[in-house]
Amino acid sequence: MILSDKRILEEIEKGTIVISPYDRKYLGTNSYDVHLGKYLATYADRVLDARRHNEIVHFEIPEEGYVLQPNTLYLGVTYEYTETHAHVPFLEGKSSTGRLGIDIHATAGKGDVGFCNTWTLEISCAQPVRIYAGMPIGQLIYFAVEGDIETFYNKKGNAKYNGRTVRPVESMMWKNEF
């Protein structure tokens, strides 16, 4: 079940959901709006290799915005840092973002119980579009968990995205055995 606005507020009060910075005006009926942070990144190489560490180049979004181009994968980051200690967080794009032809994640919309960080966004676009730091970019929804958790994400020794960051993080696929 998806948490309602009242339930999200209760969980924030209990400390099982943390959103920083938090502003009540971004709480929807059953979601919380998150915003684009000031950093983007692109991969240094045009051809990526799943078995190697693909380097990224970070840059700051200028005040006048930045024009995204089709056929390029951009890594963005949420302005908000979040912690989710008792629920499964999902990040979805806002309809207004989608109507500009912007996708904010390729496949990684689900977080894990115990995820504590900003969210790296896998941004692509259908046509050139100017974006701005601080613009609404997505919404977090929270699902109740059935059963006990054996190992929370922030306690897993092999979790690849546990380091707190304000910049987008590249793929760590190369750390997997295959």
Image (cartoon, rainbow, N blue to C red):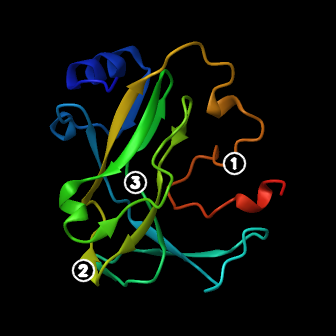
Task: Return the x and y of residue 96 as percentages of the image width and height.
Answer: 18, 60
Q: For residue 162, what is the image quadrant?
A: top right
Name the kind of residue labelled 2 in the image: Glu
3D distance between C-alphas at marks 2 and 1: 34 Å
The mark nearer the N terminus, 2 or 1, is 2
Q: Nearer the viewer, residue 13 or 84?
A: 84
Seen in the image, is 95 located left or right of residue 20?
left
Question: In the rendering, which numbered label is found on residue 160?
Answer: 1
Q: CA distance from mark 1 to mark 3?
A: 18 Å
The structure residue drawn at horizontal position 38% and vertical position 65%, both measured from the top left corner, is 38
Q: Which mark is residue 64?
A: 2
* In the image: residue 49, left or right of residue 64: right
What distance separates the C-alpha of mark 2 from that of mark 3?
19 Å
- Check the picture and name the quadrant holding the N terminus: top left
- Element under label 2? loop
Residue contact at pointers 2 and 1, CB within 8 angstroms: no
First of labels 1, 3 by sequence position: 3
Q: Quadrant of residue 90?
A: top left
Give me the disc on residue 85: none
**Which percent across, then down, holds residue 5?**
21, 26
Q: Residues within 10 Å of mark 3 (few under 14, many from 20)?
A: many
Q: Residue at x 55, y 13 (%)?
A: 147
The residue type indicated by label 3 comes to Thr
Camera-nearest label, 1 or 3: 1
Quarter that holds the C terminus: bottom right
Please, what secondary structure does the residue beneath circle 3 have?
loop
Please name the residue that numbered disc 3 is placed on: 78
Residue 149 to residue 171: above or below: above
